Amino acid sequence: MTRFAYLGPQGTFAEAALRTLPEAATAELLPQPSVVAAVEAVRGGTADAAVVPFENSVEGSVPTTLDELAYGRPLVVIKEIVLPVNFSFVARTNMALDEIKTVAAHPHTEAQCRGWIRANVPDAAVSLVASNATAAVVVAEGAYDAAVTSPIAAKHYRLTELATDVADTATALTRFVLVAPPDRLPDRTGNDKTSVVAFIRDNHTGALLEVLSEFAARGVNLTRIESRPTKDLLGKYCFFFDCEGHIADARVGDALAALHRICADVRFLGSYARVEGEPRSLPPGRSDADFAESAEWLARHRAGQLP
Amino acid sequence: MTRFAYLGPQGTFAEAALRTLPEAATAELLPQPSVVAAVEAVRGGTADAAVVPFENSVEGSVPTTLDELAYGRPLVVIKEIVLPVNFSFVARTNMALDEIKTVAAHPHTEAQCRGWIRANVPDAAVSLVASNATAAVVVAEGAYDAAVTSPIAAKHYRLTELATDVADTATALTRFVLVAPPDRLPDRTGNDKTSVVAFIRDNHTGALLEVLSEFAARGVNLTRIESRPTKDLLGKYCFFFDCEGHIADARVGDALAALHRICADVRFLGSYARVEGEPRSLPPGRSDADFAESAEWLARHRAGQLP
Amino acid sequence: MTRFAYLGPQGTFAEAALRTLPEAATAELLPQPSVVAAVEAVRGGTADAAVVPFENSVEGSVPTTLDELAYGRPLVVIKEIVLPVNFSFVARTNMALDEIKTVAAHPHTEAQCRGWIRANVPDAAVSLVASNATAAVVVAEGAYDAAVTSPIAAKHYRLTELATDVADTATALTRFVLVAPPDRLPDRTGNDKTSVVAFIRDNHTGALLEVLSEFAARGVNLTRIESRPTKDLLGKYCFFFDCEGHIADARVGDALAALHRICADVRFLGSYARVEGEPRSLPPGRSDADFAESAEWLARHRAGQLP
Amino acid sequence: MTRFAYLGPQGTFAEAALRTLPEAATAELLPQPSVVAAVEAVRGGTADAAVVPFENSVEGSVPTTLDELAYGRPLVVIKEIVLPVNFSFVARTNMALDEIKTVAAHPHTEAQCRGWIRANVPDAAVSLVASNATAAVVVAEGAYDAAVTSPIAAKHYRLTELATDVADTATALTRFVLVAPPDRLPDRTGNDKTSVVAFIRDNHTGALLEVLSEFAARGVNLTRIESRPTKDLLGKYCFFFDCEGHIADARVGDALAALHRICADVRFLGSYARVEGEPRSLPPGRSDADFAESAEWLARHRAGQLP
């Protein structure tokens, strides 16, 4: 039976993300106390894969996810899962909003629902707690009147939803990733994404331009870029890139090989099916066939075999 | 009397950062429950400036800081404050490490001290709490045996430091920023940094290359880059840049004006004294004198006045 | 009366180019023995302007024109004249092609009509002479049976055209330039071209990329580029650029000022009405209004006047 | 016996260039009336190779050489020969300079010796003739008093050198190339040059930047660039590039293959020993070993074989 670790406790958005996978229905689900613990479970072999938040998280530390992927034994992302950010306002039982004096919320949740809270329970005292699940627990235990939390936590702790779809920005989304050992590279689907982290030799703008040029030259579109301080020193940076395409695509593979040559270090973080967006049409000359044909052209010319 | 808001509660690293400013000694310090609240205090006029975490924070949400600066009424960074990340392991009274059964820690703190915790209190149960200050409070209240927290919180809540300089990475640093209304632009110091957020028209790699090229062409070195989803939609991005130099520098101002022309929108986030790093020597032709001379050269040629 | 020097002798394509100008009808036309002499006539004040070949010449040395413009007292191009390359095959009197035993031609003319000569007078001996006019003269003097030369030379020396429109490539064109002192800069027409020569500090590819990037960043399209050895040493190069637009255009002026900053030297060679091609539509943000607006934006931000 | 065609007639600098090759001593030398004829002799099989001027020629049309290489059956440059430009001032017998009334010179020679002529024979009438050899011939025949011509022509026509080292620019050089069928690609020497002509799909600055970026990204330094109108239409351009390195070098071959993909057409014009200049030290990651290692790295990652 497949074992999936995830950022717990039970009731987190990470669990909700994991449960969108059909294979989760028959798998063993292992809630973990932290992103680090979830990733380590895969490294240590106690889980086959782990779901952790990657971007705009409401549950935990995205920087931690980036750092976990960038350092330590290599793992790769094999799937991304995008969830709408969708909170519930919950209490133990049905009650009027003006009766509510205390509200618990995770700091990120509070940030995303601040406007709603001000408009609907303006007089309540808001306390910050460590997770959405904790927010549900402290309401279930009676320590707080209400909480803003995830629907899955509301369900898990059998709380009453006084309001659903609570969020200041209606279209906000959260991205989770499924992380696994590198020998589980998914096949190409035709609409893929590749993640990589590059440690550049010299932190000047020209060096970053060089790296971006390697993608641009091959018609590989970036969908995300982030500089991160390296573990040692704030001010020395590595760069996380997400790009369209799969490492098996000639243009993507060629770009990664070029990065490997010019950077101090490059770590491949996975190629996987892309959830959002259509692939852009390639500029001329960047298809697999074009790469194959140009390799033949070069071989012919090196051998002096001109038409 | 100057009023400084900061990310509270009392005892946070943000307070420690604020207290490094000489002017804080005679100012009114206003702890706020969140980054948003601290920034809003400045916007609303109840504070003159606010100290909030910006990067690699151990206290709260850096993405929140970025978003607060990128949207809403414009504010600017007028100072950066860099602190070594330096935790204390505290209890109510002096006790042996092997007596400790429960430890409270903020999730980011836990992440940065995980190795230390495993090595020193391997059998303790670690609980995550909402802030470093909360971690100190719950120990002071007796709910937990010990906490990993900030030295300032330890001092504030009169806890005993069982260990200091607790951190897995000895040289880790945290960057805070002092945020104020835009009419308080600091003077040039000769070693400055400028922050800006650019919303690019089209999210392809070429568009990002164009933006970076405007910096590179003028010899303006970037020290940080981060794409962030815009508020509306994950997948559409804006870019946060930190660069060397001051908006009053010809090369920096010229680069920002170029960005303003080619981007959908650009928001200036401040020019301020740089804490870390020396300014790079400029490539030839990028000094203020060079810009002035080239403007004269152009005017002469437009007027047909060649030597 | 305006005095126009041109690359002579009478009967050259340069004369034909000059005669396309309405003002030539009432001007004094001064044939010169060389490009150098024609340009020097303007520098020395014995002519007001000069017509010399610039590109794909059939009359003389285009490199000489480039060198004359790049060195010595500055002059500017104030007009370009494009002529179809259109030769005549001439003799003293009407005669059959198979009677022709000897043919005179300028080397460039011969190169452009080689196919025609082989097909039509395969048995004739072809001799190379110093100019199209000379080719006509030697036929008029009876030294050769026939010549391939310019229609204007045929007319001038009253020769009989045995064939017209003689050329291997039907659509070939030649570009001439009208060169004058720099105080005669033409007004903008909306479809202009600007010529410039840049001496780069360091002859590596990155340096050339930098120069081209300054044009590209401002949406200024190049229509011609040529590296030329500097006078001193083959292997050290300067670059001749033609770009769309007028030095009075904000984007062009800004690009030239940037070149002036980053290059060892830049010489402006003129802005003038473009004969061929339509102006490309500008990318967003590169109009004069955009430049003016961005300058205001910068001034406002430097003054701390944010909305 | 090897047969070498060259741009004749006897006595040209092209002959002088050819005679610098040791193998010319025992070869059959075939003077040709034009660059075109010399190149065609190789294409037609009547010569094994041809010496033609390539750059800053004093003998004939360099554009013709470029066009001959760019169109028609492919040939490659297998050697470059650089000669100092070094004219002689010659007469039939020894005579005083002030006795000289008429001087013959090729137009390019005249251009390069104009200052010397003015200073030394200011009252002589200068006539332009079709080649340096012709200039010598017309003096030998008594039609002119003196000529500026090549030392080899002076020797060939047994003229008296009244002055040697005649040239306005002491360090001028001329580059000749030895052209042969493509199956004679020379071996790498470690200090090589590669020539190529690229027909770009779209004639905007961005397209040229893309092409240059392919060289720059691989650390391949350009030593020469020239846009040339295509045969059909002035205004549509192709680009001639000379770069450091040999097509057998990984970085050069990879760059050429990339050009082949992104351009409408690319024609390889040869890799050959470089006469002038030292090879630049490569930036990190561009050696053959680096390319081989990055290919292995990519293959490993595609196969899921991470360390």
Image (cartoon, coloured by chain):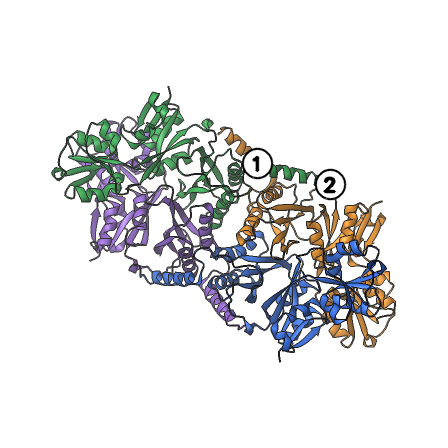
Chain colours: A orange, B blue, C purple, D green
Q: Which quadrant holds the N terminus of chain A?
A: top right
Circle 2 residue: A183
Residue D38: numbered disc: none
- B264 left or right, relative to C52: right
Which subunit holds the residue at mark 2? Answer: A
Q: Chain of mark 1?
A: D
Q: For the view shown, which residue lies furthest in the bottom direction? A: B1
Residue position for label 1: D289
Relative vertical location of residue B307 with respect to residue B29 in this rendering, above or below: above
Cβ atoms at labels 1 and 2 below 8 Å apart? no
Q: Tag count in the figure? A: 2
Give the camera-side residue of B178 and C214. Answer: B178
Q: Position of residue C282 (x, y in %)?
A: 47, 57
On screen, residue B103 versus residue C301, left or right, reads right
Q: Quadrant of residue B174?
A: bottom right
Q: Residue at x 56, y 50 (%)?
A: A202
